[in-house]
Every structure is written in C-alpha cells, then in structure tokens.
Amino acid sequence: MCGFAGIYEFARRTPAVEMSVLIDMRDSMVHRGPDGAGAWVSQDRRIGLAHRRLAIVDPDHGSQPMFGPSGECLVFNGEIYNYQRLRSKLERDGVQFATDCDTEVILHLYARKGLDCLADLDGMFAFALWDPVRECLFFARDRIGEKPLYWTVQNGRLLVASEIKALLKDPTVTAAVNEGALESYFAHLVVPAPQTLFAGIYKLEPGTYGLCDREGVRVSRYWTTGGDRRWRSDSLEQSTLEVRRLLERSVEDRLMSDVRVGILLSGGVDSTTLLALLRERAHGFATFSVGFSDQPGLDERGEARRAARELGSDHHEVEVSQNQAIAFLPELIHHQDEPLGDPVCVPLSFVCKLARDAGVKVVLAGEGADELFWGYPAYRQVLAQWKWRQAILRLPPGLRRRVPSVVSAERHPFFHETLEGLATGRALPMHVPLGASRHHRRMLLRHGENQALCPGWAPGQRDNDLERPLDTLGFDTQEYEFAIRLPELLLMRIDRFSMAHSVEARVPFLAPELVRYAYALPPEQKMRDGVGKIVLRQAIADIVPEWVLARPKQGFGAPMNRWLASHLGDVLERMLSGPAAARYLNRDVLERRLRILRSSSKAPAFPLWPVLNFLLWHRLWIEGESLEPVLGPPLEALSS
C-alpha cells in the first residue's frame, strides 16, 4: 500500500516538469508510505512520477518508481493477490525477476499484453505507467474501487495522484468548489465519480482506466460489477458451497504479507466470519474494536470482546469521547480531502491508530458483505412493505404521479421521497435517500429549487420490459451500492483513515470473483422472512458462534447527534457565521434545526453532520484557514 503522484506535460511545446513540485506532491502523502520514497523525471522533462512506500511485501526491495524491460516506468498503490500465480506463469515464459514484490509483475504483464494486463490482475490497486515507446501515460483503478486515483488537466498538463491534496501542491491547481456537485454530496454523503467537490478535479471510476498521449485524456471501462440483470439459477445448496469456497480463497489470498495482519472486529457476522476463517489458518491474530461509553447503542465492544475470547484472538479496544472527536476534526478534514459525510470516519480512524500502535500494518475488514448479501435493516424494511409499494407501481401513470401529494414532505420527508420514486414508475434503491432527502436539500441549500430526485446517479437499463418490479428494485439497489455508496463512501473512508495511520486495510468480501458470483444470487437467497445474508449465514454456520448469527445487526456509527446537541454543536454554530454558510446554505434553517436538536433528544433527523463536515472542509481547503480558532472554545469548555 502506497501513494503516488505524476505529471505529464502532454501538450506543452517546451515541457518543464519540476522535480521539486513532484516531491512536494509526493510528500504531502507521507502517511501513505513512511517506509520509502522515490521520484523520477524523464530526460526531456515531459513526464515525472513519484512514490511513497508502505512496505508490506518484500520490504527490502521493490522501491518505486520501478522500470520495465523497455523503459516503462510504474508507480503503484495496492496489492495484487494473485501475483505469485502470475509470476510463475511469466517465469515459465522466460521472464526473470529482480524482486519478490507484486509491482514487478504488472510491468512484465504490460510488456506482453499492453492494456489487456488489467484482465489478469486480481487485487486492489491504482497505478500510473509511462510507456516511452507509445509516449502514453496509462493509469487505472481496480474493479471494485478499493484504491483511489484522482486526476486533473491544467494547461496541457495531466496530474494524477492517490489523494487530492497532492494535486493541490501543484501551483497551477486552484482549490475551488464544484458547485454543481454540492447537491450530490448532501444526497449521497459523497460526490459520485467521476466528479469531486473540487472544481476541475476528477476521480477515476472503479473498473476504468485512462490513457493520455499528445491528443489528451481518454477514459474507458474495462470491467463492470453486475453484467446482465439476471439472477443465477443455482440452488441454495450450490450457492452455499460456492460462497464458502470463494470466501476461503479470498481470505487466503489476503493473508499475503511479510508483516503482521489483524482484523477490525465488531462481533457481528461479517468481521467474526473473517476471524473464524483466519483461526483455521493461524493462531493469535490481533483484533481491534472501538466504542463510545456515552452511547451504548453504538458500542459493540462487549460483543467483539466475547467473539475474540471464544475464537482466541489477541484483542485490543479503544474508547472515543466527544472531547477526542472535536480535537480530531483538523486531522479528519485533512485526510478526507473532500467531505465524506459519514460519521463513521471518526471511530474508524481511532481503531486504525490502535492497530498501528500495536505494531500491525495490515488489517482485514468486513466491508462489502452487507451490499453483496443484503444485510442492511433498510432492505428488510423496504421488502416488508413491498406489497403496498408494488400496488402503487401498478396504478395508471396519471394516478400514480398524484400519490406523493397525499403525504407532507415537511412532516415526512423520507416517506414523501419514497412515494416520489414510486410515482416515476420505478422504486428508488433501498438505500436511497442515504443522506438528505430532496425536501431537506431544498431547505438547506440556498439555490435548491430544482433538485433531482437522486442527483449524480441514474438506474441502468432493464434487460427487457418484462423484468419484474421486485427484480428491478434488487438490481437497481445493487447498482447504486456498487457505483456510489460502496466505492466512494465506505471504501474511501477506510482507505483514508487506515492510510492516515500507515495501515493497509483489505476487504475479503470484495474479491472480484466472489462479487461477480454473489451479486447475481437471487433475492430469496439473500433475504427471507426479514433475515438477511441467508446464503452467507449457511456458508459459515459451522465456524461462527451461533450467538453471533442470532445477533440483530447493530451497524457501525458514531453519536454525532448527541455530540451536536452538546459542544460539537458549538463548533457548528461558529461555522454558520462563516462565508461558506452565507454563500451556499440557508443559515436560518440550520440554526433553527440546531436549536431543535439541542432542545429535544427526539428531534427529527436532519443532516447537520454533513453540513459541519462541508463547512470545515471549505474553511481548510478553499479558504485556506486553520480550524483551530473555531475548535478552541468548545475544547476549553469540555476541559473545564
């Protein structure tokens, strides 16, 4: 796991890549790679690549940039889990290797297959590869989107990097708000790819690659998650065996490391499954959990402790207070780069730091299981209501479009939005709305009269007009999860806050082979009678304690509303007097909502944390101002 940056002056008559700028970009990401650094600029100064290394595989070798047989130059972030199998095949073809690391495999594959090398790579990755023969920069992101890659074009110069902050180190890049993406941020808690909240800066979508030559940048897709919108016909018994096989293989592959490996453990089905599978392969794995003493409903340390004790791990835990959370805000905003409006970023950072302090550089996490196997409470609620939802879908179009008017958007904003989706003749995905409802967005944004129902995302085409409405809902939901929520929110939060502490996070449930298989399993193998993850539960029933399987899903969260009703609300109150709130938001509405929250623990949900996240981001990255002046008084009040 590493961080990289690159500059390619593809359209300049007199190229002049500056090594000093390249190093500034690289070293803004020292947290991604404290174990080594390298940089290279071509003799004609048209291209430069730089790298920070976190040494996981072959720690003594594998420095980057790394060069190929024809002068190719590669910088790479991630892990190629099948590199040993690929290497063996290449060696049989006569290739000689200088290192034992996976980076070198990419170079030799590219030398033989060109862009088709992507089809062979099983792993999490982002990379940039300079081909001097074709005078082309080739950059790519893994299939699921576990690793990030950002890019921008400025005056005939392409810049690429693992983090946005690296791009901002280049003097030609100006930090400005992408105002057209602001509504998408509040709708999804993140800006959908390829946009970011920075104007003119883009993120490469999962399963895509880019090429830049003298003609400019072109982006293409090489892999899609779902394929056809058709469910598999495998029996539940067949599916159970195949899911177990694929999951075991994925876990085995993700043990590839020359350093210690641990697990982020909640005591729920997903993380306990990983621990149980690892238990069969080795003993004494370290596990890590996080909790909040002032919010028992969000504290899973007791269950994690019990799972660790029964399955024999070396367990560690940390507690996060409101004081610590407020003090952490400058680091949070710095490492997010663009706002991630999910409060889980806070506890996630603390638990990853706990792992690093224990000497663990690689952790496994359970992200992706809920999306693949339908483990979310929202899914259960929607499916329990499917009969009346389907009845609305069957109404004549004219009558169906009138249905939302019978429910007040002000009193029931999320229910009203559900009805708006049904009125279109196609139900919204089961996790939409995820952030602020359309009604809430109209209230909080100053220019919010014409919001789309689901800005930044559109459902895929049905395979045929006979697709059942329930099948349409299932596929639309999975497309939404794997296009926006999983890669750009859940995976980016774990990437940011594991790498903030120089820890590599791996997610076994998202092995592409497992994803492709489980994605197409029929709904009844995922959720039945209000119970989710049916096929997964059967696949691991012999190794996971029964009490874990019987636990209701709790979810990973943080007590943001409780904190906002207290001293964290003081931070928001101060930020509402700043220029970003005046320009983009309806301050009167937000001040009123904050007063309501402080006066009643049963106040209706309103996206105050995403608002505060945006305002802090704007102050640090757009205004260039320190966050300390707005955080000092609340911290002093907490300390007194």
Image (tube, helix red, strand yellow):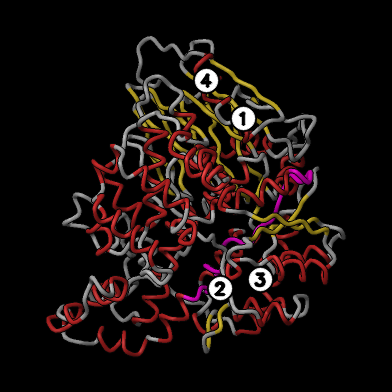
Return the residue at label 3: 268
Residue 346 in the image, given as x and y percentages of width and height = 56, 51
Residue 22 tag number: 4
**Secondary structure of the residue carrying numbered label 3:** loop
Q: Residues within 10 Å of mark 3 (few under 14, many from 20)?
A: many
* Residue lying at 59% horizontally and 36% vertically, measured from the top left: 110
Residue 30 tag number: 1
Distance between the Cα atoms at labels 3 and 2?
14 Å
Residue 521 tag number: none
Return the residue at label 2: 373
Name which residue type carries label 4.
Leu
Distance between the Cα atoms at labels 4 and 1?
13 Å
Of residues 244 and 285, the one nearer the viewer is: 285
Of residues 254 and 488, the one nearer the viewer is: 488
Point out the stretch of residues depicted in magenta. 357-377
Q: Residues within 10 Å of mark 2 (few under 14, many from 20)?
A: many
Q: Residues within 10 Å of mark 4 (few under 14, many from 20)?
A: many
Horizontal relation, residue 580 to residue 560: left or right: left
